Amino acid sequence: MKAAPEREVDRSVSQTVKAQLALRDQILSGSLRQGERISELQAVETTGASRTPVRMALVRLEEEGLLEAIPSGGFMVKAFSERDISDSIELRGTLEGLAARFAAERGVSARELEPLKECLAAIDELLRQVPISVEAFSSYVTLNARFHALLTELSRSPPLIRQIDRASALPFASPSGFVMAQSALPEAQQILIIGQEHHRVVIDAIENREGARAEAVMREHARLAVRNLRLALRNRTHLDLLPALALIKTATD
Amino acid sequence: MKAAPEREVDRSVSQTVKAQLALRDQILSGSLRQGERISELQAVETTGASRTPVRMALVRLEEEGLLEAIPSGGFMVKAFSERDISDSIELRGTLEGLAARFAAERGVSARELEPLKECLAAIDELLRQVPISVEAFSSYVTLNARFHALLTELSRSPPLIRQIDRASALPFASPSGFVMAQSALPEAQQILIIGQEHHRVVIDAIENREGARAEAVMREHARLAVRNLRLALRNRTHLDLLPALALIKTATD
DNA sequence: TCCTCCTTTTATGTATACATAACGCATACA
DNA sequence: TGTATGCGTTATGTATACATAAAAGGAGGA
């Protein structure tokens, strides 16, 4: 399939960003197999951008952690072990814990907490319906991502916010990475309820300036995601809902 | 034998790396002032590389955290507040704490601990002489960096190692960032001795699989660096020994 | 004198051409 | 038959040309 004939160049978005998004999709969907060198020429054809922006995108994706530089030149898709993924989640949790502690220790005004509480209430509303619909799960993903983003912001520490964003860039390490995978599990509802309890506690801890408690609960919150990862991988049900399944290193495959 | 070790050298002299090193030097030395847009053409002249590798280097330096992308295009040198810097150090300490905990909880063989203990002994040897010479300070910097690198490796977690490396890339956040600045302070020797005690404790904690203790002491260890930063900035003595002083946002300057 | 608009200039983003180094394949020799 | 070497192909790294968008400067009007 040749894309060359009518290559309408969309100039509203830079070619670099376009190439980056396209390549990321290809990586996460498994079009580009792990360990294999990514051909720039091939990437040029599939993304529609020329070599310069493609190259730029490759560098950014390497920094993002999805690609690995090959010593002799070029890049390949990185492979992740189950341990790598759980460590990445725990890492993210540790950083979020630090953010929560900063927020608690340095103090947060009631006005700043307002959006967090709204988020909390919205999730409460979602969890009230039994059983939880697929649409509700989808809404949960959005609200959960929002909650985590707001919480991170509460630290008011640009370096920390930056690092958390970078740690969450890996799709399987992001706060909502495994929520959809849970949707297939019978204990899904319980898991969401426990997660929401964590949300509630961290807000309470920040409000009362209990730094250690805020930090601890965010770490535990991430451990919930690790548990879900294990559960999903063991059950092997709805693995297609797992983000970046193609990146997971397996012994047999 | 088809493997050629010289390939690494080839890449190290690549125009991209050359430009990156040259630009980083310029940024840290203050040749490029914070807030001002970095002219690509000017960078081409000063680095000797052409625009493509310069552009590559700029992207990498942005990911590294030294540059900031300008919405309308191009990059500028980022400015850091004192709070930004202390947060970056504490961030690094938190990650190192996680690494130490991983090492302690997951267990480390005596053979793996060996190089750490050698490092410890070498630093002990250095600190025995009173007063500590400038050369000793310099040796300390090397050994300290080595100790922190070895400790990070002990976690045996590639994602965590990667993040710690990224967090330490900012010169003022690196483990040895403020050691030289201490050399001008009268309490320098005490500070080094306390730091070494932290090193000793973390090894002991890892050996005894005391995860919480290992984590706590590494956090405290980073706080020592934060204290030194404050001390150095307040005393304003030998500020020229501070890395990236040009990047620190000040109200007066 | 200040503000606004237009023109000019310059810098960035992109495309592409070129050179060099790596990889593969074939052939020859052990 | 296996290994090593050499050549050809191909991909990457680099340089540069071109187009567009932003910034700056000047001129005209209020």
Image (spheres, coloured by chain):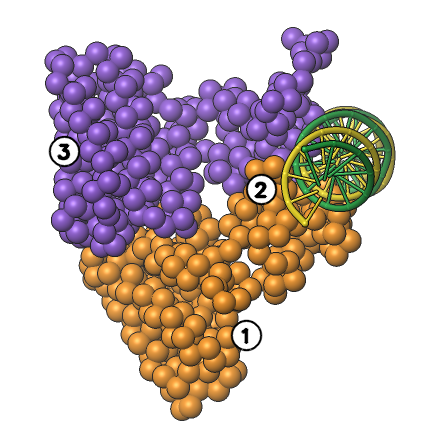
Chain colours: A purple, B orange, C yellow, D green
Q: Are marks 1 and 3 in contact (CB under 8 Å)?
A: no
Answer with left or right where residue A37 lies relative to residue C26.
left
Q: Chain of mark 1?
A: B
**Mark 3 to mark 2: distance in Å?**
40 Å
- Which residue is denoted by mark 2 in the rendering? B70
Tag 1: amino acid: Asp
Residue depth check, mark 3 versus mark 2: number of the one nearer the observer? 2
Residue depth check, mark 2 versus mark 1: number of the one nearer the observer? 2
**Percent of width and height locating residue A133:** 21, 11
Tag 3: amino acid: Glu
**SS for callout 1:** helix
> How many numbered markers are drawn?
3
**Mark 1 to mark 3: distance in Å?**
50 Å
Q: Is residue A181 visible?
A: no
**Percent of width and height locating residue A12:** 60, 22
Q: Are marks 2 and 1 in contact (CB under 8 Å)?
A: no
Task: Residue at 35%, 78% (x, y): give it.
Answer: B191
Badge 2: residue crowd in 10 Å (few <14, some 14–19, many ≥20): some
**SS for callout 2:** loop
Badge 1: residue crowd in 10 Å (few <14, some 14–19, many ≥20): few
Residue depth check, mark 1 versus mark 3: number of the one nearer the observer? 1
**Mark 2 to mark 1: distance in Å?**
29 Å
Q: Is residue B35 visible?
A: yes
- Which residue is denoted by mark 1 in the rendering? B240
Tag 2: amino acid: Ile
Answer with left or right where residue A120 lies relative to residue C30.
left
- Which residue is denoted by mark 3 in the rendering? A197
